[in-house]
Amino acid sequence: MAQHLPQRTYAELTDYLDVLRSAPRDTGTLELVVRRPGPGTREVLEEGELTLADGLIGDSWLSRATSRSIEAGRHLDAQLNVMSARMASFLAFGDPVRQAGAGDQLYLDLDLSTGNLPTGTRLAIGATAVIEVTAKPHNGCAKFTRRFGEDAERFVNSPEGKALRLRGFNARVVEPGTVRPGDSVKRL
């Protein structure tokens, strides 16, 4: 029998907007690194290795790509899924394991809005890794709705939620490196 977990209401999410909007604009923090080795499986990592070919080592992103997207190189546009650590933590009631269930690999305490990080923006994470924001949309989906509720899905997919990128964005690795929770994230 599935356990019913608490979910935020639309009103609670709206009331939290000021906290979400107050995320740092230029330099933030990597709060959580999560590997997805297979469907529905999440591993919260103390350290992750980002590479040009594999994205996050040990993650299953490439196995989910279609042969057409691989042939055209479009799969690289979704090599990494990045989400607001503030949004994910609020949705998960502060539980990092539940937060990891959002399905993203990197959770940043940074202003992820389209105004602050337009497509093509590069972010330095830790000592050497650099990722680039891609144009591929990253929206709330059926899995996100099952985990966090219909109000959360409506909220992140609302016009304001999309402008703030509360569901996050897709990215690709442009400079490999090791990343750890607590690492600095700098907009380049």
Image (tube, rainbow, N blue to C red):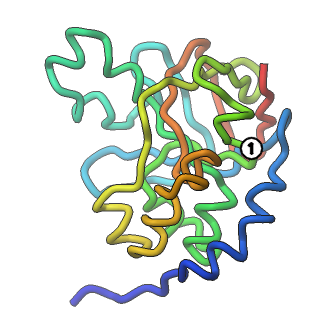
Q: Is residue 155 left or right of residue 39?
A: right
From this viewpoint, which residue is outermost toward the front?
Answer: 159
Q: Is residue 119 left or right of residue 17?
A: left
Vertical placement of residue 158 versus 106, above or below: below
Vertical placement of residue 75 versus 90, above or below: above
From this viewpoint, which residue is outermost toward the left?
Answer: 67
Residue at x-position 58% and y-position 23% = 119
Seen from the viewer's position, the closer of residues 46 and 105 is: 105
Q: Quadrant of the N terminus?
A: bottom left
Residue 183 sits in which quadrant? top right
Vertical placement of residue 40 versus 130, above or below: below
Residue at x-position 49% and y-position 82% = 7
Q: Is residue 63 left or right of residue 51?
A: left
Residue at x-position 42% and y-position 29% = 136
Seen from the viewer's position, the closer of residues 178 and 72 is: 72
SS for tag 1? loop
x, y percentage for residue 49? 55, 28
Seen from the viewer's position, the closer of residues 27 and 61 is: 27
x, y percentage for residue 152? 48, 69
x, y percentage for residue 83? 57, 48
Binning the other alpha carbons within 10 Å of mark 1 as few (below 14), some (14 to 19) or many (20 upward) gives many
Q: Quadrant of the C terminus?
A: top right
Seen from the viewer's position, the closer of residues 182 and 162 is: 162
* Kind of residue indicated by mark 1: Asp
x, y percentage for residue 21? 78, 55
Q: Which residue is mark 1?
A: 111
Residue at x-position 57% and y-position 25% = 133
Vertical placement of residue 32 versus 67, above or below: below
